[in-house]
Amino acid sequence: MIKICFPQGKQFEDYYELRWRVLRKPWNQPRGSEKDELEDKSIHIMACDGDKIVGVARLHFNSKEEAQIRYMAVDENYRRRGIGSTMLQRSEEIAKERGASHIVLNARENAVGFYEKNGYKIVEKSYVLFGEIQHYKMMKKLR
Ligand SMILES: CC(C)(COP(=O)(O)OP(=O)(O)OC[C@H]1O[C@@H](n2cnc3c(N)ncnc32)[C@H](O)[C@@H]1OP(=O)(O)O)[C@@H](O)C(=O)NCCC(=O)NCCS
């Protein structure tokens, strides 16, 4: 059974490992490149199959009203089972509980359909990562 939980202590190693393996390694990016300066101020969410971390996501606030999701990744062998959507919904609940009126994110082109299924709308074309991955800024109102 898949459970949503929050990484603690040593679990952070596997948490960042999955983030790196899915979002950085395929583009030959070094370990460490999967983190930014907001890790300590963010809420870290994961999906676990027993002891195995099979999905990760991160939530932070840009302002009192605006929350942002980054680093959403599901293990290749666990995709299309609703895990990404469940992590997204949990992140939205937390953002709402903490007073956010909306959530923004920058979706990779390949994931735009996933976010649209979850109620996000494209705001604008944003940046290109590693010279090839087009991103789209997307938004969802929470109230
Ligand atoms: C994008 C990602 C997080 C989705 O996670 P997931 O657990 O497979 O998603 P879900 O099973 O909750 O999908 C929900 C719906 O979104 C749609 N969907 C999922 N992945 C999709 C994709 N890549 N493109 C278009 N639609 C997608 C499906 O239609 C699915 O509905 P269905 O099961 O009725 O078909 C996962 O594919 C992933 O980690 N991809 C690689 C990393 C990545 O691109 N992360 C996003 C960075 S912005």
Image (cartoon, rainbow, N blue to C red):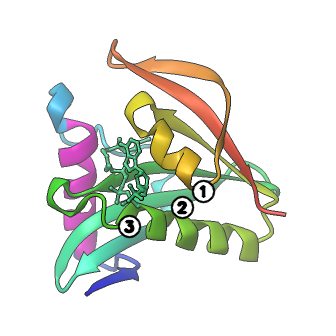
SS label for mark 2: loop
Do the numbered discs 3 and 1 sit on residues whose CB atoms are within 8 Å?
Answer: no
Residue at the (68%, 67%) spot, across then down: 95
**Residue identifier under label 3:** 82
The part of the chain drawn in magenta is 11-24
Residue 97: image quadrant is bottom right
Specify the principal SS of the magenta part: helix
Amino acid at pointer 3: Gly
Do the numbered discs 1 and 2 sit on residues whose CB atoms are within 8 Å?
Answer: yes
**Residue identifier under label 2:** 42
Q: CA distance from mark 1 to mark 2?
A: 5 Å
Quarter holding the C terminus is bottom right
Q: For marks 3 and 1, give the one nearer the viewer.
A: 3
Label 2 vs 3, first from the N-terminus: 2
Q: CA distance from mark 2 to mark 3?
A: 23 Å
SS label for mark 3: loop
* 80, above or below 27, in the image: below
Confirm or reject: label 3 Cβ below 8 Å from ligand 1: yes
Q: For marks 2 and 3, give the one nearer the viewer.
A: 3
* 61, above or below 30, in the image: below
Amino acid at pointer 2: Ser
